[in-house]
Amino acid sequence: MINTLTIIIIAVSIIIIAIATVAIYYLHYSRVINKRLKERSGNEKRMLSPKTVGIVTIILALLIFSITILLVRVNQSNTIEIDREYLTAQYNYEVLAPQDMQCGYLASYSINDNAGYEKYEEILGNIRFTYFVSNDAYDVFHPAFLIFAEYIGPEDIMTFGFQGDYLTSEHISIAGRGGFGADTQEYICIIGNTSIDCIFQLSLFYYDEDGNIAMNKELDTLDVNITGNSADYAVAAETIKIVIMRTSD
């Protein structure tokens, strides 16, 4: 809903413009009439009286006010609101190479099996996704999911890019980030955690040499540093969505 302050600001702005319009016309009208009286010429075109202009200005002001309020309401109704619980939850994820998975606690995770996780496998295009989703409640020390992604196509891959986003149950983006230009790997592992029921959406882009060159040229034309990717230049580009349920203790 539109708050009172917004309505007052809109109304005052329109009133000021209307008054200024009438005042300017009145000054112009007075100057023209006085000039005509001095010259006493009867050939001049008839001018609208300030009263008529005032009435027309009031009608137009009311019309503009109504249209403005309507547009503000439409804009507000189209604004997507995210529940506060999503805004205060925790979200994070990492993109790791095979060598990273051999270090420390990460070495306990496997592409074959992980205790306490449900295993799934999907092949989309030329990308195989093997992922694990936790059955346990939120634990800051244990990830909610692990995704192993492998390119299984025939092309020679040079680099890859990614975009990971956490979504609400209505598929509204809450938080996310992406990257481009990482050297190709045998596989990559995405490990993430969150404290709330939500959806994790992962998009992967694999580029051969030509695609990598084209992407770098595209980025060089921009004035800002971005981490965008383009399916147009990728030899493989797929998106997977994982439903995460963080059960209570």
Image: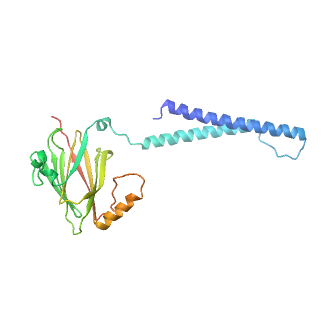
Residue 125 picture location, percent across and down: 24, 64
Task: Look at 69% across and 39% down and name the residue there.
Answer: 56
Question: Where is residue 147 drawn, in percent x and y?
Answer: 19, 52
Query: Is residue 165 shown left or right of residue 144?
Result: right
Whole-percent x, y for residue 155 in the image: 24, 68
Left or right placement of residue 60 versus residue 36 in this view: left
Viewer-side residue, 204 vs 56: 204
In the current view of this chain or complex, which residue is farthest to the right?
A: 40
Relative to the observer, which residue lies in front, 24 or 62? 24
Residue at 46% x, 43% y is 75
Residue 233 can be seen, yes or no: no
Residue at point 33%, 57% (across, down): 229
**Colour scheme of the picture:** rainbow
Q: Position of residue 82 (x, y in %)?
A: 34, 39
Quadrant of residue 127 within the rendered picture: bottom left
Residue 14 visible: yes
Location of the C terminus by quadrant is top left
What residue sits 50% from the left and 40% below the top?
A: 72
Task: Place residue 237 in its image quadrant.
Answer: bottom left
- Tally of numbered tags: 0
Location of the N terminus by quadrant is top left
Q: Viewed as shown, does residue 121 lie left or right of 62?
A: left
Q: Nearer the viewer, residue 7 or 107?
A: 107
